[in-house]
Image (spheres, grey):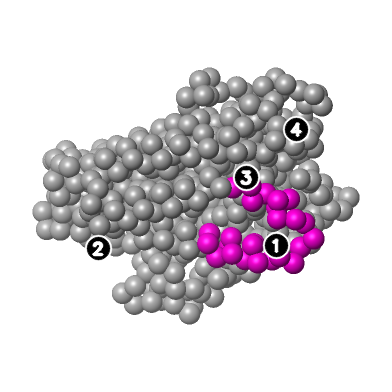
Amino acid sequence: MSIKISGKNKLKREGGLVGLILACVGASIGSGWLFGPLFTAKMAGPLAIGSWILGAAAILLLALVFAELAPMIPRAGAVVHLAHVGNGPIVGHMWSWILFLSYASIAPLEVTAVLTYANNYWPGLLQPHTDLLSGFGFFIAVIMLGLFVVTNFMVIGWVLKVNNAATWWKIGIPLLTALMLIIVAWHPGNFHMHVHNTMSDVHGMFIAIASGGVIFSLLGFRHAIDLAGESKNPKRDVPIAVIGSVLIASAVYIAVQVAFLGAVNPADLAKDGWQHLHFQGVNGPFAALAAAVGIGWLATLLYVDAFISPAGTGLIYTTTAARVTLATAETGAAPLWLNKINRHGVPWVTLIVLFLVGIIFFLPFPSWQKMVGYIASMTVLSYSIGPIALIQIRKAMPNLERPFRLWGAPVLAPLAFVVSTWIVYWSGLRTLNFIFITLFVLLAIYAFTGIFRKERWLEMGWQYMWWIFPYFIGLWVLSWIGPKDLGGEGLLAFFPSMGALAILALGVFYLAIRDSVADKTMRVYMRQFGNKVPPSAP
């Protein structure tokens, strides 16, 4: 397994600690804060607060794993390389494609969120009585996506400066909104209104983590990992940015969720309840609530923010998506011609590809809520390789220098893998069908093209990927016989199915460790990133 860097140009290390933290926080606070509290409340009622707390704990667990891993691979798109380290080319390539799809779709999704809010004061951007773009809206969306790409042609230092300015605004406006709504429109009785009954609300609390926008909103920590190749001091800055950004973003989201729950007019709840909550201007929920309680200036500010927050997130996701795509070319999962960097350190070819792919996502895809469920589940699935890689690298290179060493990794790593599996499961059977059909098609294409390659099948790494089959098949079967809340047949109740999944995930975790790439091969791979690994390391 070798890394190929094309050309003489390299990414420039111009990112500092503050820039990394704000890149992560800025990516987290986008369309998620504008829509997430609404959809989470509709699924879990007052227990939506629990969704954000549990989601934050789950993401922090994953973030801690990557806080140790990322500094050891200070390369753009580090997660792509991590999938290759212990699991061979084919698993690495599959994970590369999953990551590409999840990253490439987010900037278009954020553009769509901007236009959804804007349709409240600029009618005609959406088709009547739907959340789909009109012809005019499609035209505006393409222009906005183009602006993200053009801005990313600046050197990374300038991109981060633009993002820094936007992020301070993006932190301040949600906190101001939460404060004003709590002061002016606080209805404590709302917290006693259930969606169905107590147990169904508990189920909804877990389901909302995957499908209500919680995980989608808190995944911003990954940008510190993806931009590690452009950090001035990745060994120090990446762990701090990964952990710190999760804590900051979680605090903001919990605040706005509490404010939303308390600000809804009790009359709207009495009429429709949390599950069918609807009020005038619901496509711009926070602005509508502010206007309804007489805070007109805040409503105006929120319509401005409905451009800045998603646009800022779309900008930084375009930045990191280009780096992830670059890594897929470095590892051979994508054509090598994508791996081109100009003299300013900009991966210009990948930016053009992302623009063209992004336009496809403006076609009539499902609603924001369904799309974030797909994206969040695919992303968490791709990041679930991290806990496996952590133990694989510790086993192969126990004395490797680690700027951050996760305490209790033998327990926390398998726990992180179990939690990742639960999150994917909570997204529901329909989402799993979408993910697994996509993966099956990609795997079939890979196997077919492998017939015409010079490498032997064993060199492609098939012997390292057998753990994937019991994992994916078991996950799908348990979802199919699982609770009806998740689209299953109802043969297995909610919490027993989670217990069965935990057993499955633990078995697969240790199977993946056993069938990993040879320690010697992993050490060779890690040396390519500048790690000091003795040839005969224990």
Residue depicted at x 58% and y 30%: 391
Residue 280, numbered label:
2
Main SS, magenta residues: helix
Which label sits in the foreground, 2 or 4? 4
Q: Is residue 410 above or below residue 227?
A: above
Q: Quadrant of the C terminus?
A: top right
Q: Amino acid at mark 1?
A: Gly
320 vs 9, left or right, is left
Q: Is residue 75 magenta?
A: no
The residue under label 3 is 464
- What is the x, y in percent for residue 349? 74, 62
Residue depicted at x 21% and y 49%: 264
The residue under label 1 is 450
The residue under label 4 is 520
Q: Amino acid at mark 2?
A: Gln
Q: Amino acid at mark 4?
A: Lys
- What is the x, y in percent for residue 530? 79, 32
Judged from the image, the secondary structure of the residue bearing numbered disc 3 is: helix
Residue depicted at x 51% and y 34%: 510
Can residue 23 be seen by looking at this rendering?
Answer: no
